[in-house]
Amino acid sequence: MASGVVSHIGESVAVSKPTAVSRGAYVTFLAGDGDYVKGVVGLAKGLRKIKFAMAYYVINYSKLRIWDFVEYQKMVYLDADIQVFDNIDHLFDLPGGQFYAVMDCFCEKTWSFSKQYEIGYCQQCPDRRPWPSTKFGEPPALYFNAGFFVFEPNAATCESLLSTLQITPPTSFAEQDFLNMYFKHIYKPIPLDYNLVMAMLWRHPEKVDLEKVKVVHYCAAGSKPWRFTGEEENMDRSDIKMLVKKWWEIYEDDSLDFNRTKMTMAVASAEGSTPVAVDVKKPYMAALSKAGTARFVKAPSAA
């Protein structure tokens, strides 16, 4: 397991392999009836393949509600178009009181509306085109990609997030912009190995070591494995095709299909208790029932 440090303007956090896993869980988000359910199935099977320590859940509700799952000390949120290729349970042992995520890249056209894109500044390589402080003042706060982050559930934080959202004007990147605004004072970057955004492969290849990458985010246009044709820009690259192939190898592995008995044993082992037949969804049902409109999405049997 590799260790790593990402630093920028004096802000850094080291990630190292721990001796034990804290009480935590993985959580993802699924809304509507689109084909992202395939991504959720692939993610679920990927987590099984690397023998994650805690249970995950598939929900259909506001992403901000995950802060209400207070039965866990820490959680790792993952978008449905992410795949995990190595065990990352050690993230549950990161120091408390911080919000952990990987810094985003401003080099793609999707950021064309931003001042960073306009002047050619990217926080991934601030020395390549320095921020013009004399003209625009201090550089923007570090900005993370919200497809993957480590957070601490807290009822008060959940309430504050929801109430703050009500008075916050909408922005181009919706909840990602909102989370960056809300957590900017406690945000700590972690290595890009924990959320490889596809654009990094052609925008900042010198920063990518695919041998160390643990989490891949198939967020670039045309990169979703279940829609992949290889025809979109940059999708004919050999590294992209290799990562798409790795996703399909996990998705099509029948041995990784859901097994309730194995799930019960894994949860019991992680918590140091005797295995018993439990409904792993009950804690979430209890947490979400307060909202009145929350519901679980019935995923395919493979999930």
Image (cartoon, grey):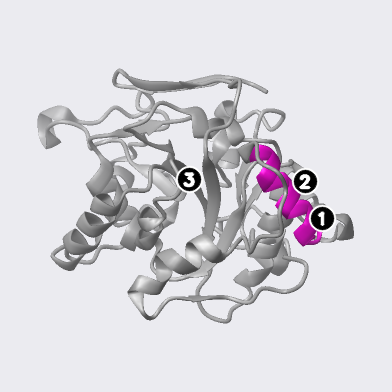
What is the spatial separation of the Cα atoms under label 3 and label 1, in whole angstroms?
Answer: 22 Å
Q: Quadrant of residue 256?
A: bottom right
- Residue 10 position in % (x across, y down): 30, 18
SS of the residue under disc 2: helix
Say if residue 191 shows up in the picture.
no
User: Mark 2 touching mark 3, by CB under 8 A?
Assistant: no
What mark, if any, has residue 49 been given in the picture? 2
Residue drawn at 37 percent across, 36 percent down: 122
User: Mark 2 touching mark 1, by CB under 8 A?
Assistant: yes
Residue drawn at 65 percent across, 36 percent down: 272
| Residue identifier under label 1 | 256
Of mark 3 and mark 1, the one earlier in the sequence is 3
- Residue 289 position in % (x across, y down): 40, 73
Residue drawn at 59 percent across, 78 percent down: 34
Q: Between 289 and 294, which is closer to the camera in this rendering?
A: 289
Crowding at mark 3 (Cα within 10 Å: few <14, some 14-19, many 20+): many
What mark, if any, has residue 75 been given in the picture? 3
- Tell me where the magenta segment starts and ends, as one range: 256-270
Check disc 1 and give the amino acid type.
Answer: Leu
Q: Is residue 261 one of those drawn in magenta?
A: yes
Q: Between 26 and 282, which is closer to the camera in this rendering?
A: 282
What mark, if any, has residue 302 been given in the picture? none
Q: Is residue 261 left or right of residue 25?
A: right
Of mark 2 and mark 3, the one earlier in the sequence is 2
SS of the residue under disc 1: helix
What is the spatial separation of the Cα atoms under label 2 and label 1, in whole angstroms?
Answer: 7 Å
- Residue 11 position in % (x across, y down): 32, 22
Q: Is residue 190 one of those drawn in magenta?
A: no
Q: Is residue 124 left or right of residue 247?
A: left
- Residue 228 position in % (x across, y down): 71, 64
